[in-house]
């Protein structure tokens, strides 16, 4: 992993390009995503952002997007908050422009790959990178590499029906608004100050997340769950509820062996995108 790669975090508000050398993000440039109905305007802005960090040493480009991707062809079919991008041949356009291989995948898969190559996932050949923030998404690592699938949809555990809605409703940041009428960050501050009601909300959240993790275990039987996303920063407040929720798993030995980690990687979105290059070598 001593090669130089560009990692792109293409969000709905900003696009960030990072120059990654030997696993270190050496330079980051950020550009607001243009508000336009013209997909080419957005593409040209992305090209300019990449050019701002590009060097002759770059061997490849990886791009993480919050949307639907055909990772085999690098075609993006839909991105949250970028309505002009419908069936855009991102990999082909950028590969032709920069004359290097380009890999595109969804942001949850990038998180998992980034942890595998640069973070706590280096210790595991089989794990699930579980992002809990505005939504609930996951990337699955099997045999040391991202699990291949047909539609870039493996790991969408948040969409599985649960109670009166789905797991995302109960296991993402929206749970705190729905149950307590405030943001999770505010509740974390209250819990830190000893507020018992705030602590109870986090306990409940942890138990719901435990149910999602039990479903993940039955589906892919990972050695570890690596948590990321904004809600994971409050792990200390929902850890107890999570452990309590896992206590009734029918195979206690599985839970005893399962490692639950919290990502501590800065710039994981950029590193994760860059890691697509290494995962496809």
Image: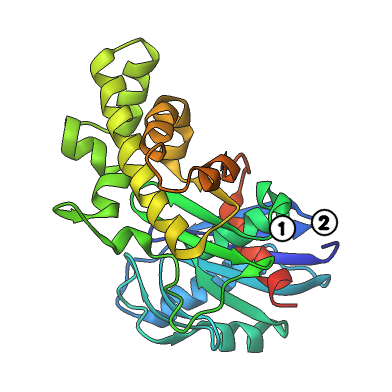
Which residue sits furthest top? 194
Mark 2 or 1: in front is 1
Mark 2 surroundings within 10 Å by alpha-carbon count, few (fewer than 14), some (14 through 19), many (20 or more):
few
Is residue 267 shown above or below 91? above
How far across and how far down the image is residue 2, in percent? 86, 62
Residue 90 x/y as whole percent? 52, 82
Q: Position of residue 168 (x, y in %)?
A: 29, 53
Location of residue 277 with respect to 20 vertically, above or below: below
Residue named by callout 1: 117
Specify the quadrant of the image occupied by residue 206: top left
- Whole-percent x, y for residue 68 in the image: 39, 75
Q: Spatial distance from mark 2 to mark 1, Cα to Cα?
A: 11 Å
Question: In the displayed structure, would residue 226 be above or below residue 197?
Answer: below
Give the camera-side residue of 247 and 172.
247
Q: Which residue is mark 2?
A: 22
Q: Nearer the viewer, residue 15 or 242?
A: 242
Q: Which mark is residue 32?
A: none
Residues packed near mark 1 inside 10 Å, few (<14), some (14 to 19) or many (20 plus):
many
Residue found 53% across the figure and 56% down from its top? 128
Residue at image position (37%, 54%) is 136
Return the residue nearer the eye: 104 or 233.
Answer: 233
Residue 262 in sight from this viewpoint:
no
Q: Residue at x 26, y 28 (%)?
A: 201
Q: Please report the residue visible at 61 percent of the width from the left and 48 percent of the height from the top.
A: 267
**Circle 2/circle 1 CB separation < 8 Å:** no
Q: Residue 102's image quarter?
A: bottom right
Of helix, strand and loop, which one carries label 1? helix
Residue closest to the far left = 164
**Residue 13 in view of the camera:** yes
Considering the numbered disc 2 on the image, is that residue within a helix, a strand or a loop? loop
Relative depth, front residue between 180 and 243: 243
């Amino acid at each position: 992993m001593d090669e130089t790669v560009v990692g792109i975090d293409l969000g709905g508000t900003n696009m960030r390009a990072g120059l990654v050398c030997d696993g270190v993000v050496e330079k980051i440039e950020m550009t607001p995503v243009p508000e336009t109905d013209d997909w080419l305007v957005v593409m040209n802005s992305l090209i300019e952002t990449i050019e701002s960090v590009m060097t002759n040493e770059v061997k490849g480009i990886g791009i993480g997007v919050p949307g639907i991707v055909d990772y085999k062809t690098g075609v993006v079919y839909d991105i949250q908050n970028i309505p002009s991008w419908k069936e855009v041949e991102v990999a082909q356009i950028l590969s032709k422009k920069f004359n290097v291989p380009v890999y595109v995948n969804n942001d949850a898969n990038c998180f998992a790959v980034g942890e595998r190559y640069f973070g706590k996932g280096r210790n595991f050949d089989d794990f699930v990178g579980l992002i809990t923030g505005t939504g609930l998404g996951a990337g699955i690592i099997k045999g040391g590499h991202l699990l291949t699938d047909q539609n870039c949809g493996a790991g969408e555990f948040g969409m599985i029906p649960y109670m009166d809605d789905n797991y995302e409703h109960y296991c993402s940041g929206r749970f705190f608004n729905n149950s307590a009428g405030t943001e999770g960050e505010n509740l974390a501050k209250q819990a830190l100050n000893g507020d018992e009601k705030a602590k109870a909300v986090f306990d409940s959240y942890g138990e719901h997340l435990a149910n999602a993790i039990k479903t993940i275990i039955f589906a892919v039987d990972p050695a570890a769950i690596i948590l990321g996303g904004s809600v994971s920063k409050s792990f200390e407040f929902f850890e107890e509820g999570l452990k309590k929720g896992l206590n009734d798993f029918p195979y206690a030995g599985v839970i005893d062996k399962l490692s639950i980690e919290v990502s501590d990687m800065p710039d994981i979105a950029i590193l994760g995108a860059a890691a697509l290059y290494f995962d496809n070598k």
